[in-house]
């Protein structure tokens, strides 16, 4: 068994990583989140209880597990406080179990204001962001004037940094009656959180290295999906961070040898939230049926997800750029009602057949999916926990996916609950 594992999404996010991390966390000592922000929502269902987490690693639900939020995450301190309060209400004690990198940049109210203004200004070319301020926070980080968790503990430095924001963001802030433009208010609210974050802030890179040397098992948790990676996804219709395996190295300050196994999470069909190319999207009754059966609405925004058949071409790209060893397939049960199940094996572009994703977005937006199909199994698979108990047609579909991608299947989810899982 591999000791340290990383869970990455292999589509446009929403693959069901929260459940997979929750399951794998049972055998891990530490769970570490490495990128993204409160724009990502991980849903975990335990019995009749549902937990939706945006910043805190999914492993926090397991008593005794240590969780870290790495420097690659942009942390909304107010959203994190809300999540901590939510956990407390649910009777989950996070004391001494949750830590945040002091080097993590913060998402502050003015980032959300800027996000809103810029998204509106794009008009019909909007990116479909969650308006959570993630992109503007990453812009500040890369421009080297971001405000970090560590700045909470140095009041004068924090004030100077906020004063500088007034200067460089004048066109967004001056004259605005939006309370998010009030940096004095933001400063005062941040200082109220300083004592809380003083108990959480650590050097995550160092802590993980110490734990690794002690033989602890670590589970690395990503957000969004590989096709939203800022470098290798459908840019500019992407998120603002590296969602692939490489993002864990920089987002947590670890070396590549610390990762023993890469687990890619694949939904049995394909969904996407927001704008951008989606070759297998079904804007018809079948797409609506997938949305209804899969309850395809964003955990963070509530927005309806765009739905379509499985895209093997896009998955080959994700498996390659993430170095996936094995895949976990989720929401198989959503396909139970279909007489026929289609899947995309190639793209057609200007009379040519493509087996791989074109990196030029202009081309990717023009490709047409080439489909093959299998007969559906028309049998309820919800809650099945053994591969041999699946209908033969469902097994054929799963084996076809694994063979095409050149990987093995480690897990199949047949429902939202923990126990509705097949271990292969």
Image (cartoon, grey):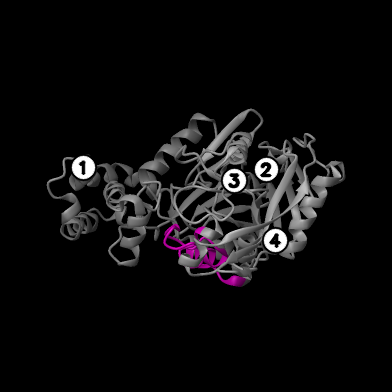
Q: Write the start and end of the magenta stretch as one range.
A: 228-256
Instruction: Find numbered disc 2 in the image and state the secondary structure of the residue it sits on.
Output: loop
Mark positioned earlier in the residue sequence (3 or 2): 3
Residue 335 appears in the picture as rendered: yes
Residue 350 found in image quarter: bottom right
* Left or right relative to 210: residue 168: left
Of helix, strand and loop, which mostly describes the magenta segment? loop
Mark 2 residue crowding within 10 angstroms, few (<14) / some (14–19) / many (20+): many
Mark 1 residue crowding within 10 angstroms, few (<14) / some (14–19) / many (20+): few
Identify the residue position indicated by label 1 in the image.
Answer: 185
Mark positioned earlier in the residue sequence (4 or 3): 4
The answer for how far apart the CA atoms under marks 4 and 2 are is 26 Å
Label pair 3/2, CB-CB below 8 angstroms: no
User: How far across and how far down the image is residue 272, in percent?
Assistant: 53, 49
Q: Residue at x 29, y 41 (%)?
A: 192
Identify the residue position indicated by label 4 in the image.
Answer: 3
Mark 4 residue crowding within 10 angstroms, few (<14) / some (14–19) / many (20+): some
Residue in front for this viewpoint, 22 or 115: 115
Identify the residue position indicated by label 2 in the image.
Answer: 331
Residue 241 found in image quarter: bottom left
Q: Residue at x 16, y 55 (%)?
A: 171
Tell whether position 302 is magenta: no
Mark positioned earlier in the residue sequence (1 or 3): 3
Mark 3 vs mark 2, foreground winner is 2
* Left or right relative to 226: residue 264: right
Q: Residue at x 30, y 67 (%)?
A: 143
Mark 4 vs mark 3, foreground winner is 3
């Amino acid at each position: 068994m591999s000791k340290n594992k990383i869970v990455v999404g292999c589509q446009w996010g929403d693959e069901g990583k929260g459940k997979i991390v929750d399951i794998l966390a049972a055998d891990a000592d530490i769970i570490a989140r490495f990128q993204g922000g409160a724009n990502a929502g991980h849903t975990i269902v335990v019995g009749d209880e549902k937990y939706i987490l945006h910043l805190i690693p999914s492993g926090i639900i397991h008593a005794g597990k240590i969780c870290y939020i790495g420097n690659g995450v942009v942390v909304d301190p107010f959203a994190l406080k809300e999540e901590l309060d939510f956990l407390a209400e649910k009777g989950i004690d996070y004391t001494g179990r949750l830590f945040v990198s002091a080097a993590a940049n913060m998402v502050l109210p003015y980032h959300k204001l800027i996000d809103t203004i810029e998204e509106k200004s794009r008009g019909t070319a909007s990116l479909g962001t969650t308006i959570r301020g993630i992109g503007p926070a990453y812009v500040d980080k890369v421009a080297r004037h971001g405000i970090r968790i560590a700045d909470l503990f140095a009041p004068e430095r924090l004030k100077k940094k906020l004063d500088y924001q007034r200067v460089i963001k004048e066109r967004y802030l001056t004259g605005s009656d939006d309370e998010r433009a009030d940096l004095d208010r933001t400063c005062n609210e941040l200082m109220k959180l300083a004592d809380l974050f003083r108990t959480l802030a650590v050097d995550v890179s160092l802590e993980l290295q110490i734990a690794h040397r002690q033989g602890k098992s670590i589970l690395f948790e990503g957000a969004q999906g590989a096709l939203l990676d800022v470098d290798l996804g459908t840019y500019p219709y992407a998120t603002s961070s590296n969602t692939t395996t490489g993002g864990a190295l920089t987002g947590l300050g670890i070396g590549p040898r610390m990762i023993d196994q890469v687990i890619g999470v694949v939904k049995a069909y394909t969904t996407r939230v927001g704008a951008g190319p989606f070759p297998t999207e079904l804007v018809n009754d079948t797409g609506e049926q997938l949305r209804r059966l899969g309850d395809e609405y964003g955990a963070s925004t509530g927005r309806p997800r765009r739905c379509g058949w499985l895209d093997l071409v896009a998955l080959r790209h994700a498996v390659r750029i993430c170095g996936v060893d094995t895949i976990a397939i989720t929401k198989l049960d959503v396909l139970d009602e279909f007489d026929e199940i289609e899947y995309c094996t190639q793209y057609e572009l200007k009379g040519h057949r493509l087996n791989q994703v074109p990196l030029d977005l202009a081309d990717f937006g023009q490709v047409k999916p080439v489909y093959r199909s299998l007969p559906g199994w028309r049998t309820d698979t919800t809650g099945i926990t053994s591969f041999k108990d699946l209908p033969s047609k469902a097994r054929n579909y799963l084996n076809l996916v694994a063979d095409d991608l050149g990987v093995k299947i480690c897990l199949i989810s047949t429902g939202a609950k923990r126990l509705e899982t097949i271990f292969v």
